Structures are given as structure tokens and as C-alpha cells.
Image (cartoon, helix red, strand yellow):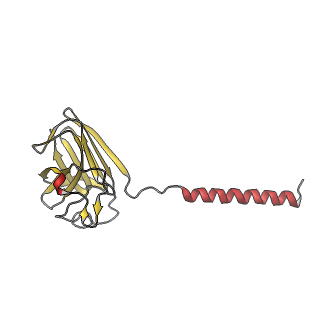
């Protein structure tokens, strides 16, 4: 039967459903601007993993702009990038013991420094810049960047049997591992 009381109850229920839906929709988490990623692979007998946050180009000048030349950078976004190996390896001819390290990089137009630091778990930057204590650096190597085969909108790491590469925008930074 269609009575004013029934009509009122129907309207009240519809209102509550609409209100509940909009409240829950507002609580849905927004995707991160720089989502967490992990690259894994094997180099020789070593299992390698690189955990990082992946920013996007978004029309910005990356090298020499967003990421300045000559200053240490967290090698990703958000937390410091971490590098884990379950075996001792050689990186660009220098020994790196099995373990977990934060990775920082100092970009240059012709040469980059790759820094493995024993402190992990920290936010990637602080007021002074990259958030690491150089006293905890366990290995620093120099590598040469090159033009990437394709444009990479989002930063990524790739691991292959020769080592790993950072790929972002139109640049590839290969790091040899044995």
C-alpha cells in the first residue's frame, strides 16, 4: 500500500544508502603518485632485489632539473631505494658482501656514482638532500649513462645476467655485476 509513511521510509532508506556510499567512496585510498615497485632477478648465483618507488616524468625535465647533476639522489622516490643480494658479488669490479643496502646515486652528464650504504629503512631525503650518512658507505662505483632504447615514463629498474639498469625518461644507467 502506498501511504505517506511508506513513502517517507523509502525516501529515508534511499537517503541513507546514498550517504553511506558517498562516505565510503571518500575513504577509498588514492593511488600513490610514485608507487612502490620491486625488481628481482639472478646474476650468476646471486639473487638480487631492488625495492624502490617509481616516479613519473609527467612532462618535467628530469636529468639536470628534477634530479640535479652533481648531488646525491635517493635513486627513486619516497623511501630510500634498497638493494639486496644473498651472495657476495662484484659491482663494477669491486666486492659487495651479501646483505641489504640503501642505494644513492650522484648523476652527472657523462658519469654517475652509485653508492651502496649500510643504513636502510630511512626516508630518502631530508632538509640537506639525500638522507644518508657517508660514514656508512660500503661501496662507491662510477658508471657511464647512455641513451635508453625507448622513453620510460615511469622510473624502473631491470635486472639481467650482466647486472642491473636504472631506466627513466630517455636514459639508462647500467651497473655491471658478477
Residue 82 in view of the camera: yes
Left or right of 27, for residue 114: left
Q: Position of residue 144 (x, y in %)?
A: 13, 53
Left or right of 152, for residue 69: left
Residue 76 vertical position relative to residue 51 in the rendered view, above or below: below
Quarter placement of the C terminus: top left
Quadrant housing residue 170: bottom left
Residue at (25, 52) in percent of width and height: 167
Residue at (20, 35) in percent of width and height: 87
**Nearest the camera: 93 or 100?**
100
Number of labelled discs? 0
Quadrant housing residue 69: bottom left
Residue at the far front: name it: 135
Residue 85 vertical position relative to residue 9 in the rendered view, above or below: above
Residue at (58, 57) in percent of width and height: 25
**Nearest the camera: 144 or 116?**
116
**Nearest the camera: 133 or 149?**
133
Amino acid at each position: 500500500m502506498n501511504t505517506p509513511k511508506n513513502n517517507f521510509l523509502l525516501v529515508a532508506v534511499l537517503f541513507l544508502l546514498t550517504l553511506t556510499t558517498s562516505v565510503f567512496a571518500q575513504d577509498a585510498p588514492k593511488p600513490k603518485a610514485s608507487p612502490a615497485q620491486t625488481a628481482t632477478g639472478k646474476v650468476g648465483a646471486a639473487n638480487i632485489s631492488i625495492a624502490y618507488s617509481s616516479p613519473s616524468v609527467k612532462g618535467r625535465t628530469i636529468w639536470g632539473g628534477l634530479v640535479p647533476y652533481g648531488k646525491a639522489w635517493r635513486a627513486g622516490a619516497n623511501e630510500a631505494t634498497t638493494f639486496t643480494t644473498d651472495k657476495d658479488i662484484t659491482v663494477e669490479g669491486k666486492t659487495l658482501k651479501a646483505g641489504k643496502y640503501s642505494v644513492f646515486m650522484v648523476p652527472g652528464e657523462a658519469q654517475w656514482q652509485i653508492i651502496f650504504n649500510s643504513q636502510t629503512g630511512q626516508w630518502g631525503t631530508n632538509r640537506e638532500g639525500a638522507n644518508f650518512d657517508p660514514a656508512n658507505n660500503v661501496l662507491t662505483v662510477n658508471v657511464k649513462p647512455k641513451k635508453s632504447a625507448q622513453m620510460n615514463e615511469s622510473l624502473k629498474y631491470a635486472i639481467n645476467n650482466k647486472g642491473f639498469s636504472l631506466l627513466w625518461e630517455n636514459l639508462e644507467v647500467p651497473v655491471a655485476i658478477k
